[in-house]
Image (tube, rainbow, N blue to C red):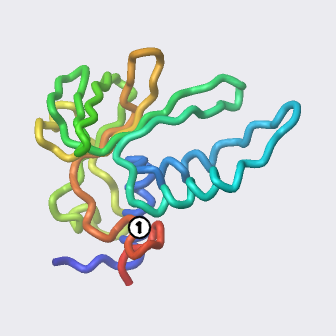
Amino acid sequence: MATLTPGLRKVLIAGGIAVALTGGGAAAVWAGTQPSPTPSGTSASPSPSASGMAKSVEGRGQAIHGEHVVKQQDGTFRTVVTQTGTIESVSSSEVTVKSEDGFTQRYAITADTRIAKLPTNVSELRNGRGKPSLPSATAADLTSGDAVRLSGTKDGDTVTATRIVSGELPAGLVGGHGHRGHGPK
């Protein structure tokens, strides 16, 4: 089993999170980079039970699928979806993914959808010296049964994939030993 250098580990963690938006932790990181809405009128602090529940849910593991609403800078709202699962079917214009809990979602694939396919050997990500790069791919490179992490946007009943990452990250690379973003030491 290949040992990852600390620099490669950091780049893979950042790249994997940024590209895949995997699970709730990455969604929280992404949401944390968005501007906070300015409160209008009165505001209330969350109840102790609500904040306690958020903490207990966070510690239970990686999210499999979910959606949340983000307020954009122009004041409009966008529904963002994330999912980790296995490809059930794929064509040039759509992909259907099923999570291990049985949840299934169909995503439209457009010219703006970014697709990457991780190599079997993560060390292949390093192209000589310098930063590793995620190899880009197309829908034709995806096959039924592939493990994927994806994110997208929802508008009405239509969900459009914005990012699809196919392949498995090495165990412990994301959030090992309870420290988000730090693998085993």
Pointer 1: what residue?
175
| The C terminus: image quadrant | bottom left
Q: Quadrant of residue 2?
A: bottom left
Q: Residue furthest left?
A: 144
Please tell me in which quadrant of the rendered image residue 132 appears: bottom left
Identity of the residue drawn at 32% across and 22% down: 108
The residue lying at 39 percent from left, 17 percent from top is: 158
Q: Quadrant of residue 76?
A: top right
- As drawn, the residue found furthest toward the top would be 156
Q: Is residue 65 left or right of residue 59?
A: left
Amino acid on which the number 1 mark rests in the picture: Gly
Q: Position of residue 175 (x, y in %)?
A: 41, 67
Question: Where residue 9 sits: x, y (%)?
Answer: 37, 71
Position of residue 9 in the picture relative to residue 68 (left or right): left
* Residue 103: x %, y % from top left: 28, 35
Question: Which residue does the image show at 56% across and 27% down from the upper left?
Answer: 78
Q: Is residue 163 above or below residue 54?
A: above
Crowd around label 1: few <14 · some 14–19 · many ≥20 (10 Å): some
